[in-house]
Amino acid sequence: MEKDKGSGFLLGLLVGSIVGGAIAVLMTPTTGEEARQFLKEKAYDPAKSKVVDLAGEVRTKAEDLAVDIKAKATDIASNLKDRAEEIWEKSKQAVSEKKDGLFDSIGKNQERKRLS
């Protein structure tokens, strides 16, 4: 959180400096060509460089975040698969036990009928 505040402050400082410099240049008695060149050298080029640097940082952070999300999603999927397999095996075992119990019950009933 503190890093975000620091980044916001620096960005505000940069924008404020650019605006202040532009106003100062526009208020001085120079030709239009000189003013444009000065603005380009003192404001546009450094701002462009800063934007490129920030874009690189954002890209790196986004890539790192994507890797983390993919790893977590893979872990979750693996855990879900393991749990599903466990539930499947328990279900098969329960059905088999019920089936065996039912066949035993049918067999006992047939034995009783035969003995009667």
Image (tube, helix red, strand yellow):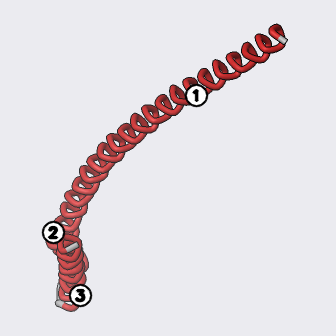
Where is residue 33? Give x, y as percent.
Answer: 23, 74
Which element type, helix, strand or loop, lies under badge 1? Answer: helix
Asked if 42 appears above or below 100 in the picture, the reply is below
Q: Label 1: which residue? A: 94
The answer to whether marks 3 and 1 mark residues whose Cβ atoms lie closer than 8 Å is no
Mark 2 surroundings within 10 Å by alpha-carbon count, few (fewer than 14), some (14 through 19), many (20 or more) = few
Which residue position is annotated with label 3?
23
Identify the residue at image location x=45%, y=36%.
83
For the residues bearing labels 3 and 2, Cβ distance under 8 angstroms? no
User: Going by the image, does 113 lie left or right of 67?
Assistant: right
Q: Quadrant of the C terminus?
A: top right
Quadrant of the image containing the N terminus: bottom left
Can the viewer see residue 29 in this picture? yes
Foreground tag (2 vs 1): 1
Which residue in the protein does label 2 denote? 41
Q: From where the camera sits, is residue 39 visible?
A: no
CA–CA distance in space, label 2 to label 1: 79 Å
> Which residue is at a point 78% across and 17% down the rendered structure image?
109
- Residue occupying image coordinates x 66% and y 21%: 99
The residue under label 2 is which amino acid type? Glu
